[in-house]
Structure formats: structure tokens, C-alpha cells
């Protein structure tokens, strides 16, 4: 029986409070001060019964919370929860996501009404025995050795309480990305629950960037991405491509499983690098169990598997935690990937088919400046809402021809920059660092070096044309402009040998890793 429990009304917020031993938990009431005011003033018994019946759902929630969840949190529990909040694993659910295109409120709609168990703002929490039983049920259905402990409890608090609004949007985005993940995981014989790894890594933000520079839904570092054939340039970032990075992630996870033979060790190696996991195994006397080597792993990686277990739990029991998925603008089934056989810009698609630019950016984040370059070997892929696919197929050549001169200029810039980046700024170009002075504009800097503003934006991944004093800009200056442009143009249009060889080499590196294991061992994905 709960002692020292006080039930009262916070008149400033309209919240009902349960307090015990200094711990206060707010249970949001669906009532207003005005509506409950009669209950505070003298009333006759009949009126009192009617008022109490009106608020029966509130009292039920209070009863459930008091009886099902011990209100006092031990110092150890609070310390574990605080540690989970400060972990880099939960960083992707931070406030920075609120400013990204994919998490803005106008890209989601409210869930369908109905089926409410609790008042809208009520936050249920449960006893350790309930969490243990639920995770035990999930463990029966998967190859992952899911367990409940205090480390997992801390991350359940992060996802189900502290960041529940963001989790509502993540649940909506699962309808965009999970069908793709499940398809590719199945092809590589990887348990379908591995899809939750992308939630831990990026909160399903395809343009997420970690402090260490890992990018995309699956948070590949540049070196790891190159091992699996992912291209990174000023114009294209394959790590932002949901399809390509998902395939690369499956190949990488498969390689790691061939090395360790345990999915929790695979998760640890995915985060810290295979070398660090092997060191931890040696330090633990050869043990190959995650929890036995846990003390010897890097600090960041110790929270990685607990976060994965917590995400797996919340993604399956969000209803019990009164979290409703926010509906995204598009579902995976509403879109289709189609080949593009010539240079094409997002503006052409908008002006000829009426596809909103924001939707094109959302579905194709890999094309950083809205240009789909002319293919060097195989066709580049574009994801479109299905309602536009038939029109694109019928008018494809007309679309390519619409304002083709504008696209040709962008294609020429792409070819020149790609040539510079491929050759590391060789005889055809020089790379300079420009420090912005007070009063300088982006147009002024472009004029100074005889380049286009669009080049400056692409080379430096600028989100706007505003510059700040002291800001450093990378500038490529073509020394022999015509020959460089001609050479790069021929590379894109006709010389498939060089480009194709690179593509094939990049796509096959992971197979070499399966044989010798050296490539995978060298990877460190510390974030």
C-alpha cells in the first residue's frame, strides 16, 4: 500500500499531482480549472457524485499509476536515467532534430482519433516486473538475447518519457523506412529486429550527422562507406540515400556476424569497431558474451546495446505508454524508385510535373543541391510519389529538354568538381581556404575567385547564402579550366572504364573482407 501520497490540484497548470517523499510526478489532467472549480466549492451530495463520475477516467489513471509504479526512485535508478540522457546514443533524439526538415511538425499529421486508454498527456510508467515480463515475451520471438536491467531501464525512460514527442514522429517514419529495411535484412538473412538499430543510430533522420562525422540513417563514417561503395562528394552523398546505405549496412552487419557469431557483439562492433570488441574479448578472458565483456568496452558502447533493447521495447509497447504515431506525409508504399538516364534537376521536375521541391528533397536527400547527374555507368535512381511516376515515364524526354541549358551548367560544374575531387586537386585545380572578412558576401567571394555562387554553396555544404566573419570556405580554382572541364566531361559522358572500375571496386570490397577480415577489423565507428 502506498503511504504518504497526496492528491492535489496545481492551480497554475491544471495538473493533478501525486507526491511521495519529495518525488513529484505530474499526471496531466484532461480537465480545466474552471471545470473542476465546482468540486472545490460546497455542493450537495448529488452534484458531487455527478462531478466524480465525470472525472472517472482521471481517477482511474491516478489509481493505475499509484498501484502499478513505485513512486520513489532510488538514487541508483536516477543515476542510471541521467547517464542514459547524457549518452551520445540518445543525442540523435536531441533538440537539434527539431530544426531538421524531416522532423518539423508540418511534415506530420495527427494520428487518427479513437482507441484512447488514457488522457492525452498522461505518461504511464510501470514496475520492473512488468518491463521484465514484456521484454521476456519479445525475447521469445527473436535471435537477440533481450534482457531487462537497470541500464535498459534508463533508456526506456529516455524514449518513453523524456523524448516521447520525438518518438511519436519516429514511429510515423517507420512507415516510410521500415518496409525497405525489412526487405533488405531478409535478403541478407539478418533478424528483422535489426531495423531498430537505425532508430538508435539516427532516429530515422536520413541526413543525421554525428559529432564524429557519421552520416545517414545507419550512420556510416566516410571510410566505412567507401568500403561498401558509398560515394561522397560536394554534389552527392550516398550515405544520405536510404536505399544504398541500407544495403551497405546489411553487408557490413553480415560481415561482422561472420566474424563474431553473436548479434549483440555485432552491435558493439558496429558502434566501436571490430578491433575494440576483440580487445574487450581478450580482456574478459576470451568470453564472447556482451554482458561479460561490457566492462571492457569503450564507455560510449556500454550504452549501445541497452539503448537497442529499450528501442525494441518501446517500438512494440508504445501504445501501453500512451504514445501515438504521428502520420508522415508519405508512406513507403506511396513511392517508387525510377531510373534517370540524363542530367535532371529538381526544378525541372517541379515545373513540368508539379512535384513539390520539399517532397523531392525529403525522398531524395542524397542529391545535395537538387541535381541528379548524368549517369557515368548505370542510371541514377530517383524516388518519386507514385502518382507522378506514370507522367514522368510518358514525358521523360520532354522533362530532360525543359530548360536544358540550366541543367547543363550544373552538370558542367558537377563534372569539374568531381574531376577535382577524384584527383585530389591535382594539376587541373588548386584548393584554397578563404577566411570571410567582415562585410563580405557570398557573391563577392565568388567574384573574387571567378567561380559561381552555386559552386561555393556545394563545396562548403552551405545551408544559406549568409556568411559570418571568420568563417572558413573551401575554394577550388581551376588552373586550366577548358582542358579540365573537357576531361571531366568526357569522364562522365563517355569514359566508362575509369568510373565503372571504381564503382565495381567499391561495390566488391565487402566480399574481400569476408575472406581475410582485415578490412572489417580496421574499421572504427566511434561517434
Image (tube, grey):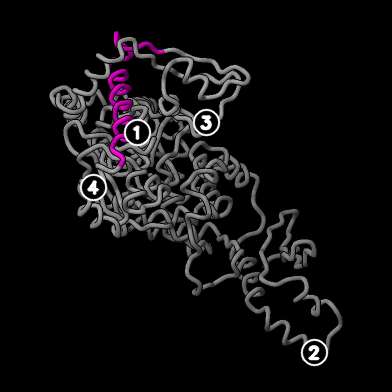
- Front label number (2 vs 3): 3
Element assignment for label 1? loop
Residue at 25 percent across and 42 percent down: it is 401
User: What crowding class fits label 1: few (fewer than 14 Cα within 10 Å), some (14-19), or many (20 or more)?
Assistant: some
Q: Which residue is mark 4?
A: 398
- Whole-number angstrom distance, CA of label 4 to CA of label 3: 32 Å
Element assignment for label 2? helix
Mark on residue 465? 3
**Quadrant of image for the C terminus:** top left
**Mark 1 or mark 4: which comes first in sequence?**
1
Q: Are marks 4 and 2 in contact (CB under 8 Å)?
A: no
Q: Quadrant of residue 43?
A: bottom right
Q: Which residue is mark 1?
A: 237
| Rendering coords of residue 86 (x, y %) | 57, 38
> Which range is magenta?
403-431
- Specify whether 398 is left or right of 55: left
- Front label number (1 vs 2): 1
List the single residue furthest toward the left: 497
Residue nearest the viewer, comparing 84 with 417 = 417
Q: Which residue is mark 2?
A: 45
User: What crowding class fits label 2: few (fewer than 14 Cα within 10 Å), some (14-19), or many (20 or more)?
Assistant: few
Amino acid at each position: 500500500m502506498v503511504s504518504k501520497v497526496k492528491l492535489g490540484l496545481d492551480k497554475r497548470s491544471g495538473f493533478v499531482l501525486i507526491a511521495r517523499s519529495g518525488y513529484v510526478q505530474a499526471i496531466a489532467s484532461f480537465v480545466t480549472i474552471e471545470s473542476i472549480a465546482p468540486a472545490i466549492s460546497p455542493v450537495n451530495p448529488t452534484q458531487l457524485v455527478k462531478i466524480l463520475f465525470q472525472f472517472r477516467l482521471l481517477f482511474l489513471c491516478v489509481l493505475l499509476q499509484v498501484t502499478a509504479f513505485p513512486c520513489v526512485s532510488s538514487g541508483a535508478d536516477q543515476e542510471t536515467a541521467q547517464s542514459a540522457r547524457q549518452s551520445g546514443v540518445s543525442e540523435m533524439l536531441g533538440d537539434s532534430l527539431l530544426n531538421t526538415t524531416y522532423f518539423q511538425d508540418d511534415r506530420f499529421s495527427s494520428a487518427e482519433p479513437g482507441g484512447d486508454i488514457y488522457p492525452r498527456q498522461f505518461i504511464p510508467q510501470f514496475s520492473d516486473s512488468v518491463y521484465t515480463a514484456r521484454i521476456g515475451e519479445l525475447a521469445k520471438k527473436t535471435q537477440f538475447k533481450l534482457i531487462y536491467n537497470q541500464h535498459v531501464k534508463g533508456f526506456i525512460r529516455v524514449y518513453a518519457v523524456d523524448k516521447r514527442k520525438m518518438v511519436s514522429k519516429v514511429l510515423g517514419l517507420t512507415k516510410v523506412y521500415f518496409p525497405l529495411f525489412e526487405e533488405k535484412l531478409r535478403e541478407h538473412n539478418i533478424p528483422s529486429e535489426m531495423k531498430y538499430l537505425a532508430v538508435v543510430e539516427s532516429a530515422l533522420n536520413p541526413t543525421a550527422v554525428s559529432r564524429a562525422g557519421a552520416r545517414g540513417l545507419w550512420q556510416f563514417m566516410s571510410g566505412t562507406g567507401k568500403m561498401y561503395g558509398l560515394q561522397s562528394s560536394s554534389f552527392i552523398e550516398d550515405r544520405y540515400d536510404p536505399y544504398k546505405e541500407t544495403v551497405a549496412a546489411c553487408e557490413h552487419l553480415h560481415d561482422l556476424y561472420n566474424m563474431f557469431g553473436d548479434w549483440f557483439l555485432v552491435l558493439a562492433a558496429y558502434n566501436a569497431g571490430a578491433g575494440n570488441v576483440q580487445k574487450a574479448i581478450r580482456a574478459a578472458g576470451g568470453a564472447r558474451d556482451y554482458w561479460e565483456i561490457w566492462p571492457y568496452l569503450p564507455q560510449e558502447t556500454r550504452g549501445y546495446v541497452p539503448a537497442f533493447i529499450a528501442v525494441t521495447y518501446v517500438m512494440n509497447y508504445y501504445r501501453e505508454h500512451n504514445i501515438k504515431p504521428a502520420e508522415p506525409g508519405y508512406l513507403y508504399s506511396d513511392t517508387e524508385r525510377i531510373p534517370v538516364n540524363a542530367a535532371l534537376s529538381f526544378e525541372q521536375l517541379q515545373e513540368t510535373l508539379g512535384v513539390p521541391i520539399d517532397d523531392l528533397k525529403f525522398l531524395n536527400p542524397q542529391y545535395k543541391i537538387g541535381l541528379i547527374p548524368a549517369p557515368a555507368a548505370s542510371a541514377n535512381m530517383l524516388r518519386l510519389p507514385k502518382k507522378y511516376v506514370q507522367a514522368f515515364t510518358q514525358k521523360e524526354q520532354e522533362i530532360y529538354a525543359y530548360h536544358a541549358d540550366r541543367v547543363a551548367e550544373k552538370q558542367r560544374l558537377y563534372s569539374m568538381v568531381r574531376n577535382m575531387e577524384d584527383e585530389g586537386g591535382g594539376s587541373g585545380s588548386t584548393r584554397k581556404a578563404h577566411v570571410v572578412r567582415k562585410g563580405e558576401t557570398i557573391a563577392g567571394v565568388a567574384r573574387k575567385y571567378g567561380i559561381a555562387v552555386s559552386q561555393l554553396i556545394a563545396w562548403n555544404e552551405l545551408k544559406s547564402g549568409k556568411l559570418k566573419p571568420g568563417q572558413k570556405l573551401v575554394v577550388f580554382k581551376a588552373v586550366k579550366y577548358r582542358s579540365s572541364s573537357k576531361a571531366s566531361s568526357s569522364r562522365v559522358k563517355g569514359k566508362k572504364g575509369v568510373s565503372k572500375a571504381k564503382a565495381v571496386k567499391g561495390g566488391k570490397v565487402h566480399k574481400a573482407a569476408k575472406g581475410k577480415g582485415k578490412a572489417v577489423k580496421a574499421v572504427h565507428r566511434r561517434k
